[in-house]
Amino acid sequence: METIIRTDKVDKIYYQGRPEEVRALNQIDLEIPKNRLVLIRGPSGSGKTTLLNLISTIDRPTHGSIFLRGEDISKYSDVQLSRIRQKTIGLIFQNFNLLPRLPAWENVAFPLLPLGVMERDRRERSVEMLIQLKLEKRVDHPPEQMSGGEQQRVAIARALINDPEIMMADEPTSNIDAESIKIFLDILTDLKSKGKTIIVSSHDPVFLDYSETIFLLKDGRLMDIEQRESK
């Protein structure tokens, strides 16, 4: 299997050198295969979200290195990391992080603004993405007029608008109902079939039956790695 992301002895320490120092991650070595559905699991406080933030380039490790397609990105500038997020990584946040005053299509189109895409083209691409996710009736609705599942699909559309190679989701089932969870799992399966690498951070056991690579964290340490046959 081809490796798309690798970490080498990664630590994340908060308040380093102070009495309240917290070691959130400790010597994490892992390899994430390309075009797999990957689950980072573990109890609350195990370091799942911290690890996802590091490999998504939102945050930086205190020690160690992170490699993307074999290239060490740990020392990249903020501008370089921002470009990686724009072009390569789509993020779905736990609380969706939608802009409350903007309609669905503008939320989806938001990542296109720094790229200088004209408004007409932004709307066209966003509406097309919303239609694919069965949200054609919510194109001009703000988040407050949508269910949790609909808001999540808007967040998915926003994450996909630049056709990223990697999709990452943090605790994606924590704010949606059972029906929306099933829709979300179907979307992930479809994205994986189209060649995307999917990385989910969650303690929800619903992902176990769908995942092909499973990393188990506990107290900031990588305790187990399970590789399964591709589905």
Image (tube, rainbow, N blue to C red):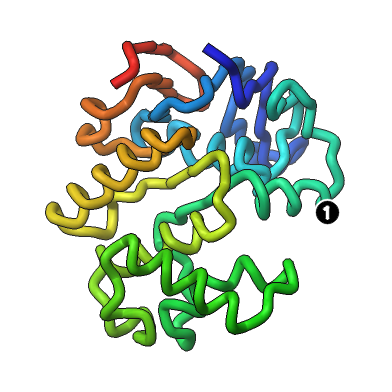
Residue 168 place in picture, x, y as percent: 48, 43
Residue at screen point 63% across, 44% down: 88
Residue at screen point 76% across, 27% down: 63
Residue 202 place in picture, x, y as percent: 35, 38
Whether 218 is drawn above or below 108: the answer is above
Q: Quarter holding the C terminus?
A: top left
Task: Report which quarter residue 30 is drawn in.
Answer: top right
Whether 231 is drawn above or below 163: the answer is above
Task: Report which quarter residue 204 is drawn in.
Answer: top left
Residue at screen point 21% across, 52% down: 183
SS label for mark 1: helix
Residue 43 vs residue 89, the one in the foreground: 89
Residue 113 place in picture, x, y as percent: 68, 73
Residue 120 vs residue 135, the one in the foreground: 120
Q: Which residue is mark 1?
A: 79
Q: Residues within 10 Å of mark 1 (few under 14, many from 20)?
A: few
- Say whether residue 168 is left or right of residue 119: left
